[in-house]
Image: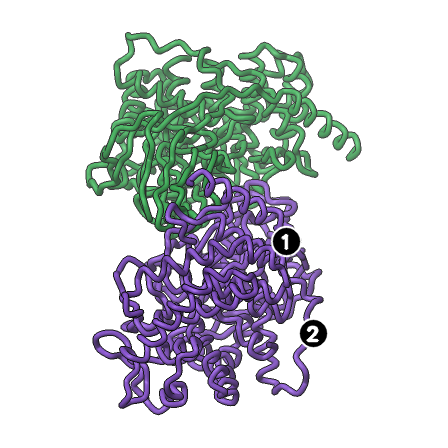
Chain colours: A green, B purple
Amino acid sequence: MANTTDMKSAQWLKVAQKNTPELHHKTIYPQRTITMEQDPGAFQGWGAKQQHSFNPGDVLEAGREAEFILDFGEYCVGQLSFALSVEEKYDAPLWIKISFAEVVSEIAEPFEYQGTLGRGWLQEEIMTIDYPSGIIQLPRRYAFRYVKFQICGGWYRFYLKDIACKTVTSADVKAIAPLPESFSPVLRRIDRISLDTLKNCMQTVFEDGPKRDRRLWLGDFRLQALVNYHSFKNYELCKRCLYLFAGLTDERGVIPSCLFEKPAPHRGQDFILDYTALFMPTLLEYAKASGDLDTAAELWPVAVHQLKTVLEEVDSEGLFHDSKKWWLFIDWQEGLDKQAPEQGVVIFSLKKGIELGQMLNNSDDIAWIKTQAGKMSAAAVKYLFDPVSQLFVSGETRQISWASQAWMTIAGVTPAPVMSNIATVPDAVKPAGPYLYHYVVEAMYVAGMEREAQTLISDYWGKMAKLGADTFWEIFDPENHRLSPYKCHQINSYCHAWSCTPSYFLRA
Amino acid sequence: MANTTDMKSAQWLKVAQKNTPELHHKTIYPQRTITMEQDPGAFQGWGAKQQHSFNPGDVLEAGREAEFILDFGEYCVGQLSFALSVEEKYDAPLWIKISFAEVVSEIAEPFEYQGTLGRGWLQEEIMTIDYPSGIIQLPRRYAFRYVKFQICGGWYRFYLKDIACKTVTSADVKAIAPLPESFSPVLRRIDRISLDTLKNCMQTVFEDGPKRDRRLWLGDFRLQALVNYHSFKNYELCKRCLYLFAGLTDERGVIPSCLFEKPAPHRGQDFILDYTALFMPTLLEYAKASGDLDTAAELWPVAVHQLKTVLEEVDSEGLFHDSKKWWLFIDWQEGLDKQAPEQGVVIFSLKKGIELGQMLNNSDDIAWIKTQAGKMSAAAVKYLFDPVSQLFVSGETRQISWASQAWMTIAGVTPAPVMSNIATVPDAVKPAGPYLYHYVVEAMYVAGMEREAQTLISDYWGKMAKLGADTFWEIFDPENHRLSPYKCHQINSYCHAWSCTPSYFLRA
């Protein structure tokens, strides 16, 4: 059995390999030089002030030492290159430190990193160049709008020119029609930023962030794919990602919650129960959007196995319990109780399993999935719905959260209009990040609250847009711009997959 | 005329090119890991304390983040490489900062550089490696005994092994016989350190320092060549250096005081009068050591032109005056008056011109050089010798310095035993660095003070040896270890050409 699984895994990784997408390139030049200025009204307290405009032929030059901050005018993912030359009286190696920033604070504040993730995600290089002449091509792919050059030479002048970024994406921007003018300017701007976010995350997989973590996360992938079906329509990339997940299951047959492409495809160490459950909906949505039922049929057993796996955490009455064996994500909100939201995620995923099973005529599986979905829906109402408040509650503390109402609504378990009811409970636990904000908006649409959904998009994503976001952020708390689950706001990702979904709502 | 000069220059640079020496390589492995500890008795207040011994097959490993300081056990000039690997659960780029140190303080203290030279001389690299596996070969040639690795990864272990330095030198160490056992252990140790210093400076030119400035300086070259004639005997390298200087004269026909090989041979911006004068002795010494009179004959006009050039600073009575058009070096000692020492340097160089002219039978030139040497010697006694103190004095303040007595003695202008007289003047201006210490020792030998000369070698260079020098330093003030003419002791060169001359005295 292990051998058969191994053979299948290898075969599926080959399918993934064959579906490596074509990459599109564009050359972007800096638009201006800037200085960073403290500004209490700006995002994270830092504003960019124009120093000089900058044209492609312009040269940055100085003697001895200098600092230049270039603004490329838009968010770029790609390779930076520049031409370097020095005066003939050159007498000492040229020391160059280059720092890249998605947002101003990254280079306005020093990288005195004390965070919990690897500091390698902070984009900086120090190069000492003995004979500075010719084209310098930096070694990595960077994600940035701003680049800071700190240079120290000797008693000679140095010149930087032809500074350019060759961007890379697997998104074909020609495939996109602009949003009709019937949408408000704010919503059209949010749509543009959403699509820029998705485009920059679309590489040879759907990365969660092109700066960090540059890997494929199952939960983020589902949301990116949904936007992609209504915009870039890159089905090949979705197929590749599905096969990568299927090809990298662990010894229990469980799909990893994240995976890496290089040096060779391998799985991450995280297993998030809600993500595992969502593989089934992700496969269904791909099949429906692309019409590729062959892939759906081939990966159906994998998707079913994920459902079976998460059901191990559900008791005989159909109630989910946290066995502490899994990472339960749902949202970054501290103190959020996950029981009810996970119950919702699993019911939703079971129901999507029924739908895909019907498309594939897998009547045997459909039968038990239906039974489970029914049992879990009943348990949700029996144990997690509070008739007094007319809201779902979660865990032993009977916590009331937006997460619980949203996921139960999406799962179609609605003994009451919980999405409107929750709006009247000011101390309900709120979403902390865009990932859960997405599901709250989705639940509002499901609940027929289209106006409230658009208002939330305009308020939450619109606030990022108003603060100057070029792409939407991984973390955004309007009350605390420096919030970071990693103890360092500079390492947050500011172009992040799971934040790109307004375009899905506006275009679907 | 300019065209002829240009043609000659090009031709001489070709001769230099043809005499590019063979390079010798050796692989050096780290001996131990160390920590840096403050130690008031150690050089610059820092000692290296052994942590673990380290063998070629050993692996440095850690998870998350780590700092390792490796001691290679000897001074190395060359390329560093190592093999890098990571655990399969690799999840974040590996950030590596590598700092190289000739002496402990360079990595015990941060590079918060405020000095006057380019900070590019401080050897550090930051690399961010996306897929850490395989051999990493660092881009530059480094000069070091110690290497500090600061590494930060993610939630995985990383492994460094096969750490090695492939050294490079044009010195053939097989050419060296050890000093006879009749010399004291101290002197034999000083000799060994001197030769290590020279070896590491011998590259495709005689560099002044393999860390800094990595260029050919005329004054240092003369001293290196003198040691070389009694040790490695690489005449080809000397010839190359002579032709590089001759091929890079400026529009006035003046030899630059320093020159660079790369990207193409070009002259530095410095013109030091004492160095310019010394081209003639340097050419003579080469001809005598190598027997290559063809080179001496070909470059004779260049050497003569340098004498004529420096004589423009000498008045009709034969006295040198500082016109402020030149950099007068002699020594780094602040406040040192240069008149008398420069007078001595020029007389010495004229006399060496007479000797080389005689070897080459250039009677016309010999005649006027003899006249000038006589006139300048007389002027030295008339205007710069103080009959009361029986010492040479310099400048309007009639400053008494070791520099003046030394150079007059070397020039053979000795109306009194000035080298023994100066020893009784405690407030005479002392030498500040090894370059002038060399000439003081040489003057002692010239004055027949062999015992005093050896004592000075044992005291001054021996003090460096006692403080743990692997190679001799550019700057050494026993009273102030952090003295730096560049306002940063870390940027001082700790393997420096002009400090290698004890071997000349001990072996000549």
Amino acid on which the number 1 mark rests in the picture: Pro
Question: Relative to the observer, which residue lies in front, A241 or A78?
Answer: A78
The answer to whether residue A199 is above or below residue A508 is below
Q: Which of the image's four quarters has the N terminus of chain B?
A: top left
Is A72 left, or right, of A264 in this rendering?
left
At 48% from the left and 37% from the top, the residue drawn is A138
The answer to whether residue B145 is above or below residue B405 is above
Q: Position of residue B137 (x, y in %)?
A: 60, 48
Q: Position of residue B77 (x, y in %)?
A: 58, 59
Name the residue beneath numbered marker 2.
Answer: B177
Label annotation for residue A219: none
Is B266 left, or right, of B289 in this rendering?
left
Q: CA distance from mark 2 to mark 1?
A: 21 Å
Question: Relative to the observer, which residue lies in front, B451 or B130?
Answer: B451
Amino acid on which the number 2 mark rests in the picture: Ala
Name the residue beneath numbered marker 1.
Answer: B21
Question: Relative to the observer, which residue lies in front, B29 or B280?
Answer: B280
Q: Position of residue A190 (x, y in %)?
A: 32, 21
At 54% from the left and 46% from the top, the residue drawn is B13
Question: Does the image show residue B236?
Answer: yes
Secondary structure of residue under mark 2: loop
Secondary structure of residue under mark 1: loop
Question: Relative to the observer, which residue lies in front, A54 or A143?
Answer: A54
Q: Position of residue B30 (x, y in %)?
A: 63, 64
Q: Chain of mark 1?
A: B
